[in-house]
Structure formats: structure tokens, C-alpha cells
Amino acid sequence: MTETPLSDHFKVPPLDGSLCVPEVYDWHYIHNADRPIFVYSEREDGPTTYVTYGEFVPALHRAGRLISCELNINADGDRGDYPVVAVLSTADTISTFTLLVGMLRLGIIGFPISPRFSAPVIAHLLQKTGATDVFVSLESPRVHQLARDSISLVVSQSNGEKAEEIRIHPVPLFSDIYRKDLPFEPIRKKNYALSSTALIVHSSNSSSEYPKAIPWSVRMQSQHSTIPAKSSHDLRGVIFSCHSIELFHTLGLFFLFWVPTSGMIMATFKPSSPAVKPTSDLAFTGIQSSKSTYVLTHTRFLEAWSQESSKVAHLRTLKAVLSGGKILKKSVGDFLANQGVSLCNMYGSTECGQISAMPSGTHAAALNSPFTNLTLECDAESQGREWEYFQLNPQCGARFIDQGNSSFHLVVVDSGAQTIPISNTTYMGEDACTTGDVLVPHPTKPNHWKVLGRIDDQIMLCTGEVVNPVQLENLVCASQFVNAAVIFGRSRTHLGVLVELAEPIDTDARVVEKAKNLIWPGIQALNSSSPPHCHISREMIIFVKAEKPLPYNPKGSPKRASVLLQYQQEIDSCYEGAADLLLADIRNSANKNTENISHVLSEALQHSSGPKNLLPGAKALKEVFQSFIARIL
């Protein structure tokens, strides 16, 4: 390990497809041995340590040989029928990254699995992929037990026929694979057929009972490796904070392909066993200590950082702050963008691959950024809205099916430059993969899009809970005063409802309150028969305006995507006002006596959601907090 990089010049590897991803890493050992691939620091004011390609490449080959010994296979033999090997790891980022690239170089099919999944889910994935071995972080007793429980379920569900073959192996430690006292023994070059599977990746489990196991081919990983080279950002020598990265999620795994072709330097926590568990504070300290200029992070971390002016001030100096997966809260995104933070949306899926550019065009130029010419121009009034859009990856075969309401259903086809991992539909006679997402284009900027919602109407809250709106809408529509209802709340903390009354009303506040009283019994029925995350408060009721009638489909139901687009402004305003009103109720009721905390919160919630029968003591307080959190988190 070195304290400073030994060379400032990064030689770009061939990007013409002549080298697959593991071969690109080998290429760097010859041409960029003194260039760093990782950087870490123990503390904010401490020295930084770099891991160079000259150190990384021997380590990945060493990891491959350790794996081959554990599996009892010939590391220098033909790739042939190498097994599917699962990885259930909580090890540090550098060790896990090295392990996965070592698997790619060895030629076995690695399958990283989230250690947050339950044993039944992991057992399902092991069965579906036919995995014969699992590498596990043995320093974590919980993960080790999780692996054992998962394998036991496989055994019980398969009558012991094949499950007996699933073996547990230890994930190699950093100290095992980064050893300077051992000679470099390169694994013999393999024949990587482009159509063969290189890696298996599971989906996020957001729209089905179990996550899907999706094979990623050698061709796909090579094609995806060129995406950063086609963006407007030059990432050579850029320090890219990946302190929040997870190498079992799609976005994290793309970095296996992007790092060696872009020349970026991944900033991580110091390798350790057990690994550092990322928190918003630790991740932010890592950004500062590594002197990162680009950041990939969780939206929940961004939301926490937005609460501290000193952190916002530092984010403003960065060239880009990337996030993906869960959508950033609109109020937080608007605030950060208006503060000058360069936000950048990442959009893609396990099934379709990367859809947005890497990085996408940023929004709200960093005040001292030399990259302002690469930033989308937006005036002060529209700046808060710009960050919601992403720039389309130019090599992605995106196809947009017009929904007839200025919104489009996105499907992805093979473009020649980018292969889709799987096909689950057709488009114009071509194999295609549907995203299930409805998008809207930017009004003035070509190839910039915003995700509006799901084509299948399911609503996923930002808490991860999924809501089927149809059942809730039926409860609201049971009232004689209601003609139609549309539940909304995608990527929010709680639900709301847009109600079309049998007789339209005006917007006078007193008239609106009377209308809420009329339909309130139906809302109470919904709240009493549904889990907390499905509850609707009085503040989250919007009424259809006479001048903005709902569009209907031929079956007589509101066209959900059109409705959400038409009433987006009212929905955004509703969320912004609801939390303020509830907090005002609490402040007006509070008397700083901790014995009355449950009473204070109960009164506020009774106002918004109806009466609740509370039991005295801790149980009551717990129930009130659960409902409270569901409202204003």
C-alpha cells in the first residue's frame, strides 16, 4: 500500500470489446501498475492510503486461487462447467470487490446475495440457481447462522437430494489476499465465451414475493464497462466516494465494470474485520477524509446530511452527488438543488441493465465546480424540479410506448451496443425487457426523463412497504358522496387520496372541511382495517377540481398515470403542508412533561386519523409512535 499515488497519468484500456472485464484488470497490471484503484483513510485528518493496480491484480489472482482450493477445482484448467458459487458477505468493500473480480478471472459464476434477506428468500435463490457452494463472512455469527439456516431449508424442501452438496466456505480476509510475502502466480488465461454467464445478480424484491436471479453475460459486462466513457464526465483520476456502496446490489456491482475502464479511484472505508458498518456520519467523514469529488450514496444519507448546514456546504463543493434505488424525497432534493448541490440520478435495473448515463447530467452546478459547462442549465424557478430527471445512457436501447397522456412506458431492447440481461416481452418484433415504469420526458431537454410511477399501479413507499391501492380506493368509494378515488404515495412516507365527489365543490377552506367530514367514515373504515403504513390522514385528502376533471379509460376507471401527472402540483403541496400541520398540533399540545408524551401525540393523531383506543404505559407510547412515524418520517 502507498500513501501517495506514484503516477498521475492513467492509460485508458482498449474499449473495443477485445478484452473482457477481468482481462482489462490484467491489462492494468502491465500499463497502470502504479495507478491507484482504491483509497482509504482512518480518520478525517489522517493520511490517505492507496491500493494500486500493481497490488490489486496479484490480490485478485490470489483470491481466485484460494477459491479454487476451497472448491477443489483446477485454477489453470478450462472454464468448462464451473459451479455457481454464492457469496453472503459483510466483509469490507475492498476485500469483497477483490473476491468478486477474482471469481470473474477464475471463471466461476459468482452470485452475491444480500445478507439482509431472510433464510427462506436465500434458500429460494440457492435452489433457483443450483448453487453448490456459499462463501460466508465467518466473522459475523449472524450471517454464518443465516447461511446454515438457508441451507437447512434447501435440504428440507428438496428431500436432501441435491442440497447436501451446498458447502460453506470462509470469505478470504484482506490479510489473506493482500500479501506481499507471496509471489504473484497469475491464473492461466481463460476462454470467456461472450454469451456465457459471468455473474448472477438478484433483483431488489420490490414487486414480487421473491427476488429474481438474473444472469449477466460476459458480453453484457464488457458492454456496460464502456458506459462511463460515453458520459460528459472525465473520471480519470477522480476520487469517487463509495463508502455507502453494497456489492450485492445492481448499482454497486456495476462498479466492478466501470472502475477499470473509467480510471476512477474508489474511496472506501479502511479494510478491517469485522468491516466498518456505514452510517451517515461515518460515510460523510469518509467523503471528507478521502477528498472525494464525486459521491455515490443512499438517499437516506442525503436526507440526513441535508439537516446540517456544514454538510450541505461541503456537498456544494462536490462535482456530483449520485443516488439510485429509492427516489430522494422531493423536498430534500429541491432544497439541496437550490443550495447549489449537484444532484445526479442513477436509474437502471437488474433485468434491463443501466439505463441512465454514468454519471448523468448534474443539476444545480456546484458553486466552485470547474465542470459547470457540463451541468444542465436551469433558472432559479425550475431548479428544484430539474434534479428529478436523469440523462439517458446513449448506448441503452430504450423504447418508449406512448400512454396517451404525455407519459410513456419504458421497455429496453438490445441496441447492439448494450445487451439486455433477460427478455420478458417483445417490442416491434424484437425481444425486449419491460421496466414496468411510466416516465415523462423533460419539457425542453432531449433524452432527459423522470420516473412517474409503476405501470402495474402498485405503490411502494420510501419505507419499502408495498401498497395495492385498488382495495383502499374501493373502501373510499363505498361512500355515497364519492364518485372515484385515486391513492397516491409512491416513494413517500405515507399515502394520500385524490377524491372525486359526486357533486363538485369549490376550494373554499370551510367547504373543503365539510366535504372531508362527509367522506370521513369511509376513511376511518380504511384506517381501522389496514396496517399503519396504509392509513390516510385528513391532511392527505385532495378533492378533484371542477376545472381539472379526471380522465377515464374505456372501462370507466380513472387513468392513474394521467391523474397523477395532472395533479402532481397539488400532491406535492399536500405533502409539504401535512407534516407542518401535524407538528403544529403537537407543539400546541405539548407541555414538556414526559409523562404526557403519549397523550400529546395521541391527540394530534386523533385529529388527523380519527380516535384511537390507547392502552396505558409503554405499549400505548409504542403504538402512538408507530402511527406518528408513519405520518411524518
Image: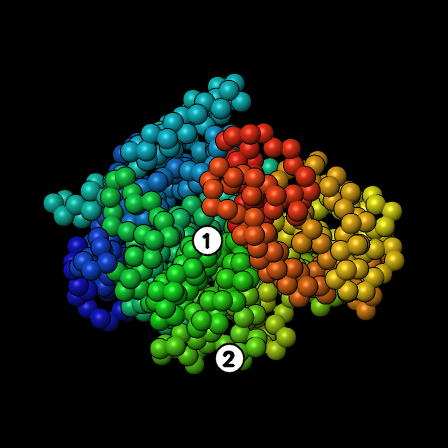
Q: Amino acid at mark 1?
A: Arg
Q: Is residue 244 above or below residue 272?
A: below
Residue at the spot x=45%, y=71% of the render?
339
* Quarter occupied by residue 170: top left
Residue at the spot x=45%, y=48% of the render?
249
Residue 518 position within the rendered picture, expressed as x and y whole percent measured from the top left: 81, 49
Please report whichever mark, 2 or 1, sits nearer to the chain's N-terminal start.
1
Extreme residue toward the top, this view = 159
Q: Is residue 141 above or below residue 50?
A: above
Residue beneath disc 2: 377
Residue 273 visible in the current orientation: yes
Q: How was this image coloured?
A: rainbow
Q: Which label number is shown at residue 475? A: none
Extreme residue toward the left, this view = 181
For disc 1, the neighbor class at 10 Å (few under 14, some 14 to 19, many from 20) is some
Residue at the spot x=17%, y=59% of the render?
47
Residue beneath disc 1: 300
Foreground residue among 532 and 442: 532
